[in-house]
Amino acid sequence: MIRGNFLLPVLLLAGLLLSNRAFAQPTESTRLFERMVEQVTAQEEALIALRHDIHRHPEVSGEEERTAGLVAEHLTALGFDVRTGVGGHGVVAVLEGNRPGAIVAFRADMDAVPSTAEDPVEYRSVIPGVRHICGHDVHTTVGVGLAEGFAAVKDDLPGSVMLIFQPAEERGIGANAMLAEGAFDTITPEAIFALHTAPYNVGTVATVAGGMMSGRASIAVTVRGAGDLIEAASTVREAIEGVGTHPPQMAGMIAPKGFIMVNLFPQRGTAGGNIVIQGQIMAAGYEDRARAKAAVLDTLKALDLPGITLETAYNERFMEGVNNDAALVNLANSGIQALAPTVGIETVSGAVPAFSEDFGSFQARVPGVMYFLGVSNPETGTVGMPHSPTYVADDGSILVGTHAMLAAMLTRMMNN
C-alpha cells in the first residue's frame, strides 16, 4: 500500500513528461514548412536579383513575353509541369506531391504600367515610359519563391501546387483570358491565393472576409423618344449618380463596407439622334453589387419622362472584384500564425472604391483569398502606394510574402 502511493505520483509525473515531450514535437506541417523556408532563405539573394531584373525590364499588359519566359525557365528547372501561352503570355505550372492532399493555387500578375515619372530606385526601369509601380514584379518573384519552397519538399508534399502567372491584369482581361483558354481545364484547384502590394509596413499582410476590392458593373442607357432628349438625359444622369454613396472626390481612399461609387462617362449622341449615357458602378462584395444593381434599375424605372423611353444594358460582372472566402480566410490566417508567427496579420477595415482586381474572376470559380502585402519601410522613408509616381516596394517584402503564402497554402493542402 505504501509502495502504491509512492508509485502513483511517479507514474503521473512520467506521463506528464511524456505528454509535454509529445506536445513539444514539431508537427508535420512545421517540419515541411521549416524545410521550405530553409530553401527559400538560401535563395533570397537570387530572388531579389530576379525581382530587380523584372523591374528593370517592365512589360505592359499583353507584352509580358520576357517576364513569362523567365518564370517558365525557373519553374521548369524546378520540376514543375509548365504550360505557356495561356490567355496571352500566361504561365500555368503544376507540381504534384507524392501524398494525398488538396490542390492549391497561387496567382501572380506580371504586367507593368505606363509611367513617365522618374524611377527612384537603383535598379530603375530601362524601358522609357514603363514602370512597375503596382508591385507585380514583387508578386511574380513571390510566385517563384513559392516554387522553390514547394519543390524542396516534393517527395513529402501532400497534394499539388498550381502556380498561375497572369498577364494583362491592369487591363482587367488577363484572368478571364486564361480561364477561357483552359487554365483550370486540366486541373482545377480547390483554393486559390494571391498577394497585392500595399502601403502597410514590411513584415505584415492584411486581408478580410468578403469584399476587399471593388467589383465593377457597366451600364449603358439609351435615351430615345419624341420628348426633350437633352433634359431627359440630364435627369437620367442625375438619377444614376444619386445612387452613389461615396463621393467621387474620395476616390482612392478607403471606403467603408457597403459603398456604391458611380462613374459616368461623357454622354454621346447616336446617328438617330438618341443620347447614350455610359459608365461604371463600383461596389465591393457580391451583396453590395446586387444592391447597387437593384438601386440603379429601380431608380431608372421610377423616373417619369413623358414621351421618353429608356433602353438599359447592365452588366453586373463587367469586372470581378476581390471577394474573399470567409472560411478560407480563417484557415489561412491560422496557418500563418502557427507556421510563420513573425508575419503580422492585419484586418482590412474597408475597401478601395476606385481600384479593382481581376483576381476575382478566379474567386468566382473556386474559393480564394487575396492578402495585401506590406511593402513600405519607414526606416528608409519609402511608401508603397500602388500607382503613385514615387512608389517603392521594399525587397524585404519578398520573403515575408513567400513565407505567408507557403504557410497559408500548406495549411489548406493538409486540411483536405
Image: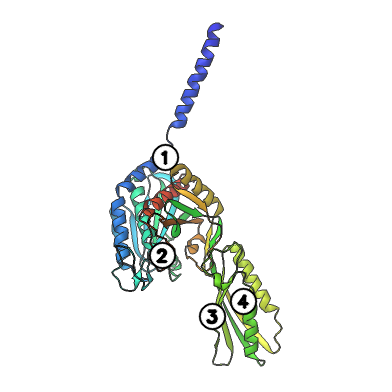
Image location of residue 34, percent across then percent down:
37, 41
**Residue 382, quarter of the rendered image:** bottom left
Front-most of residues 404 and 146: 404
Image location of residue 253, percent across then percent down:
53, 65
Task: Indicate which disc residue 265 carries.
Answer: 3
Image location of residue 324, percent across then percent down:
53, 57
Q: Is residue 187 visible?
A: no
Give the position of the N terminus as an image quadrant.
top right
Q: CA distance from mark 1 to mark 4?
A: 53 Å
Front-most of residues 95 and 226: 226
Mark 3, Cα crowd under 10 Å, few <14 / some 14-19 / many 20+, is few
Viewer-nearest of labels 1 and 4? 4
Q: At 47% from the left edge and 27% from the top edge, which residue is drawn? A: 20
Looking at the image, tell me whether mark 2 or mark 3 is earlier in sequence order.
2
Viewer-nearest of labels 3 and 1? 3
Q: Is residue 302 left or right of residue 319?
A: right
Mark 1–mark 4 CB contact (< 8 Å): no
Looking at the image, tell me whether mark 1 or mark 4 is earlier in sequence order.
1
Q: Identify which amino acid the numbered label 1 is placed on.
A: Thr
Front-most of residues 205 and 75: 205
Q: At 33% from the left edge and 47% from the top edge, which residue is drawn? A: 41
**Residue 263, quarter of the rendered image:** bottom right
Q: Identify which amino acid the numbered label 4 is placed on.
A: Glu
| Circle 4: element type | helix
Circle 4 residue: 241
- Furthest toward the top, the residue is 2
